[in-house]
Amino acid sequence: MNLSSILGNTRRHDISLFSNGRIDITSGIVNTLGIREGDVIDIMHGDGEFYLYVAVTASSTSCGRHQARCYPSKRGARHFRAYSRRLCAAMLHECRCSKRVDLAAGATVCINGHTALHLITRRPISSL
């Protein structure tokens, strides 16, 4: 008898990056990093690892237009969305994907005074 799992991978993704520049962020990441509407996210790279962090807070004195500025995906939601084609293109290239990649988040670390989340890029949850 040949048996196989219906679900396969049961781990849900924490962040999705699309080739059109859309970045979907789950409420778990929003809560962990304390992301608020208007904050700007970025990804640090070092030693083959990637870390998601809040680069510019909405309450800071910086002004102007920023890539990857976060907004709720719908009114009252804790899921956030941001747009940055450059950030998405770099991550899709790193994960060897062309249209979309769903990543899980790992441990929280403090790097250069920023609270950051480790992104697990070696084993994407799903990719296209």
Image: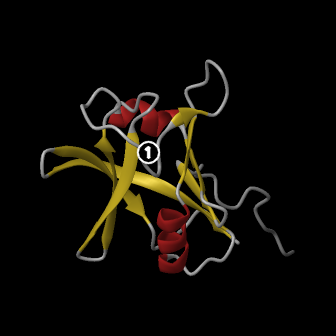
Amino acid residing under circle 1: Arg
**Colour pattern of the rendering:** secondary structure
Number of numbered discs overlaid on the protein picture:
1
Q: Residue furthest left?
A: 112
Q: Which residue lies furthest to the top in this view?
A: 76
13 to the left or right of 35: right
Please give the name of the residue rendered at 87% of the width and 74% of the height, measured from the top-left corner: 1
Indicate whether 67 appears above or below 120: above
56 to the left or right of 29: left
Query: Can you give x and y, in whole percent of width and height, for residue 111 in the image?
Result: 16, 53
Indicate whether 10 appears above or below 121: above
- What element does badge 1 sit on? loop
Please give the name of the residue rendered at 45% of the width and 74% of the height, measured from the top-left corner: 122
Q: Which residue lies furthest to the right in this view?
A: 1
Please give the name of the residue rendered at 43% of the width and 45% of the height, measured from the top-left corner: 65
Q: Quadrant of residue 2?
A: bottom right
Please state which of residues 80 and 28 is positioned toward the viewer in this rendering.
80
Indicate whether 107 appears above or below 85: above
Please give the name of the residue rendered at 70% of the width and 72% of the height, measured from the top-left corner: 128
Q: Name the residue under label 1.
A: 65
Q: In which quarter of the image is residue 49?
A: bottom left
Badge 1 local density, few (<14 within 10 Å), some, or many (20+)? Answer: few
Query: Can you give x and y, in whole percent of width and height, for residue 58 in the image?
Result: 35, 30
111 to the left or right of 88: left
Query: Can you give x and y, in whole percent of width and height, for residue 120 in the image?
Result: 42, 63
Indicate whether 81 appears above or below 11: above
Q: Quadrant of residue 7?
A: bottom right
